[in-house]
Amino acid sequence: MSDKIFWDKKYENQQTGWDIGYASTPLVEYFDQLTNKELYILIPGVGNAYELEYLWKKGFKNVYALDLSEKPINNFLQRVKDFPKDQIICDDFFKTSISIKFDLIIEQTFFCALPPSMREQYVLHTHRLLKEGGKISGLLFTFPLSMEGPPFGGSIQEYQKLFNQYFTIKKMEECYNSIPPRQGNELFVILEKNV
């Protein structure tokens, strides 16, 4: 599932059930509370990049997209022609040599697409990519974990144990403003990097 061909085929065959066609309501409401437009923001596994588009149009100019597949990135560039191409990284999240340290990493269906065996690696890599005091903010699925994904679920207890060593959990609670199909199956999280 960390294979470019796997994800290219998903987009080619329109097997993109996670793609809701617009920026997710919980993230939009979170973005609307951000006042510092100078933040360096990364969205890994950005897909068709609706959240990226929303941030860009709100005046956040230091937003970066990362995805393994160029197909959804090209869809985004058709919609947002003025987005700087040097802020788009088509690479494996875990192998990318990105040198920027970010204030904020947005989590939206990327973590849940990774095989559960890679979750600890995700925690370590996001920790490395963040500035001191940087945060992961976004959504995690809470339907029961199974091996039939992606997406893969999990529990609040599992996530607390996973992130606790490297992050201070500022918020990890049931998302009150999920879109209807995801109601009751999402946590909203704000995780601040520990030194």
Image (cartoon, rainbow, N blue to C red):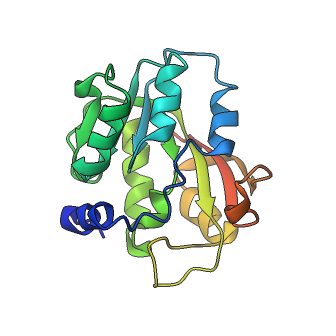
Q: Where is residue 59 in the image (x, y as percent from the top left)?
A: 51, 15
Query: Which image quarter: residue 120?
Result: bottom left
The quadrant in which the N terminus is found is: bottom left
For image coordinates 43% across by 65% down, the residue present is: 113
Image height of 118 relative to 131, above or below = below
For image coordinates 57% across by 73% down, the residue present is: 153
Relative horizontal placement of residue 32, taking residue 131 as reference (left or right): right
For image coordinates 60% across by 73% down, the residue present is: 154
Relative horizontal placement of residue 53, taking residue 189 as reference (left or right): left
Numbered label tally: 0
Q: Name the residue at the right extreme.
A: 176
The front one of 135 and 53 is 53
Image height of 114 relative to 54, above or below = below
Q: Where is residue 135 in the image (x, y as percent from the top left)?
A: 55, 38
Q: Where is residue 56 in the image (x, y as percent from the top left)?
A: 46, 23
Q: Where is residue 133 in the image (x, y as percent from the top left)?
A: 54, 31
For image coordinates 63% across by 80% down, the residue present is: 144
Query: Which image quarter: residue 98?
Result: top left
The front one of 183 and 20 is 20
